[in-house]
Image: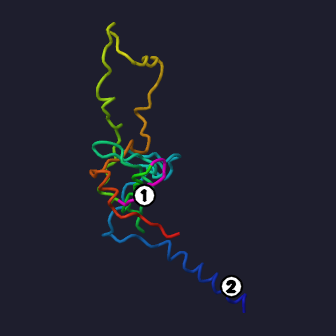
Amino acid sequence: MKSQLATLILGAALASGPALAQTTAPANAPAAPATRSADAKTFPIKQGEWRSSKLIGLNVYNQDDKIGDINELIVDHSGKIEAVVIGVGGFLGMGEHDVAVPFGQVKFMEEARRTAARANPPAANTTGTVANNPPAAPANTTTRADTYRGYPDHAEVSMTKDQLKALPEVRYSR
């Protein structure tokens, strides 16, 4: 009995192989989106694509100051990021609570955040030299400006720290 069943399954598999191999896409099927080369030895990350592991821990700012950092990304079944969970309040993780902000309300910034210290150059001292001016980099060093690093520098939201703290806390079922 077992050998007959095995023979029947094997025969069905062999008979269906050529039929499956002959299927073609319908003429009105949409073209497949452009993908990276299948024979490539590497998978380069393109500008605007981010490594999700690097988004966790990313600092979040409003127009005034740092308001928290990203603790979690909420993803739906299709892979779309629905919300960004930001840890707000607290000090060194104590008293912090997580709030979910819709992904569309979080702006990811590639460029470094400009602060007052970076925006205003240091003042010249009485000798005419600039105070706290670091020495120039040696001429033979190379920069990695032409290499995309694969994640943004920081994130921004247009909410105050108090507005974020007022959002309902995210609770996870364990």
Q: Which residue is mark 2?
A: 6
Any part of residue 102 in sight: no
Any part of residue 60 in sight: yes
Mark 2 surroundings: few (<14), some (14-19) or many (≥20) residues within 10 A: few
Image quadrant occupied by the N terminus: bottom right
Give the numbered dot on residue 97: 1
Marks 2 and 1, the one that precedes in the sequence: 2
Name the residue type under label 1.
His
Q: Residue furthest bottom?
A: 1
The magenta-colored residue range is 91-100
**Residue 155 rendering spot, x and y as whole percentages:** 35, 47
Is 8 part of what is drawn in magenta? no
Give the numbered dot on residue 68: none
Name the residue type under label 2.
Ala
Q: Is residue 148 above or below residue 55?
A: above
Q: At 30% from the left edge and 57% from the top edge, which residue is drawn?
A: 104
Please, what is the dominant secondary structure of the magenta stretch? Answer: loop
Q: Is residue 3 above or below residue 38?
A: below
